[in-house]
Structure formats: C-alpha cells, structure tokens
Amino acid sequence: MGRNYRAHARELGNEPPAEPLLFWKPPSSLLRPGGTVELPPTDVSARVDQEAEIALVIGRRARHVAPADALAHVFGVTLAFDITARDLQKKNDQWTRAKGMDGFCPVGPLVVAGLDPQSLTFSCPVRGATRQQGDARDMIFSPAELVAYASRFFTLEPGDLLLTGTPEGVAPLEPGDDLELECGQIGVLRAS
Ligand code: ZN
C-alpha cells in the first residue's frame, strides 16, 4: 500500500490518498532475514530508499470481505522493507519496476499471531541514527480496511503479504549500509 501515513505522503510532496493506493511486489522481490539487498547500477537507479513497514500475512482466503471480518483472514504480523528505487518511481506511473526488483522485499524474522497490528510501534536505525519511527495508529487506512479493500479486487490467498505503508523518514541507502527494523513484539529484521 502506498502513502498510508500522512507525514510520509507529504515528505515526498504528495497528498494523502482518498482511497488505499495499491501496488504490486513480485515473489522474486522477497529476501530472507539477514539477506543482502543488491543495489542496481547507478545508471539504472541513483536513489534507492528504505521504507520500514508492518506486513500482514494472510491466513484464510479473502474475497470481498467486510472490514469487520477482515482481520479474521490474517494469520499474523511480520516486518518488511519496501525497498524503492525512488527515481524510477517518479519516472513511471505504476511502481512495479521501482519496487519490484529482486531482493527489494526483505521480510521477517517471525510471523506473530494474535497481535493487534494497529497497536505496534517500530523503528528503523541506519548508520546509528533512527531514520524512521512508526506508530501503526497513524495509518490513514487501518489494516482491516486495507485487507477488505484489496479483497474487492484480488482474491487474497494464505501466505500473501500485505505491506501497510511507511511512516516518514525515507532516505537513500548507500552501499554497505546495514538495515534494521525493530518492533518489540516481533523482533528485529536485519538486511544489508
Ligand atoms: Zn512502502
């Protein structure tokens, strides 16, 4: 989901969306915890940003579900980076290329069941400084609204991941950066 936190939409000069903004990351973008994000050559992209996000793991097939029933279709919650080639995102109306490259979706380390996804806070330090600090209560569209909305267009299958958007503080990565995404109830997702 794009632009699901007001302050992040505004930091890139965008208005918060009137309805959820869906995009797609292919399975080949998944990266195991501790994996290395391969930055594209600079003639392909000169700016690759981290986006720290809470991710929902679907547990039961969801099609046309109501918001009140949506979280019953979620198995658990995990952490993910929506790695984004920002310059390619600006070049293309749709974001598949900018956000869908191999390894652009580090995810993990655990899937935790029984959590209220909107109760979570998380932080992302890079080079020793906290870049992003998220509070899921600041989402424009709640996790239940996101699942219900997406299920109107695509059948969500067990194992599907929904990334719920990033708070403000996105910034370029440099070769050799270590990424961490910390959430007390889930653990620490590391990538490099
Ligand atoms: Zn994102």
Image: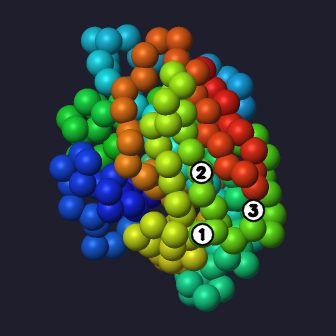
Residue at 81% over, 64% down:
113
Residue 2 in picture, x, y percent from top left: 38, 55
Q: Nearer the viewer, residue 163 or 62?
A: 163
Residue 3 in picture, x, y percent from top left: 35, 57
The structure's colour scheme is rainbow
- Read off the residue under disc 2: 122
Residue at 60% over, 69% down:
118
* Mark pair 3, 1: CA separation: 12 Å
- Disc 2 and disc 3 in contact, CB within 8 angstroms: no
Residue at 67% over, 30% down:
190
**Picture quadrant where residue 7 is located:** bottom left
- Disc 2 and disc 1 in contact, CB within 8 angstroms: no
- Disc 3 and disc 1 in contact, CB within 8 angstroms: no
Residue 90 in the figure: left or right of residue 21: left
Tell me if residue 27 can be seen: no
* Quadrant in which the N terminus appears: bottom left
Residue 118: give its label.
1
* Mark pair 2, 3: CA separation: 16 Å
Residue 12 in the figure: left or right of residue 155: left
* Amino acid found under the numbered disc labelled 2: Phe
Residue 125 in the figure: left or right of residue 32: left
Mark positioned earlier in the residue sequence (3 or 1): 3
- Read off the residue under disc 3: 76
Residue at 63% over, 26% down:
191
Residue 67 in picture, x, y percent from top left: 56, 84
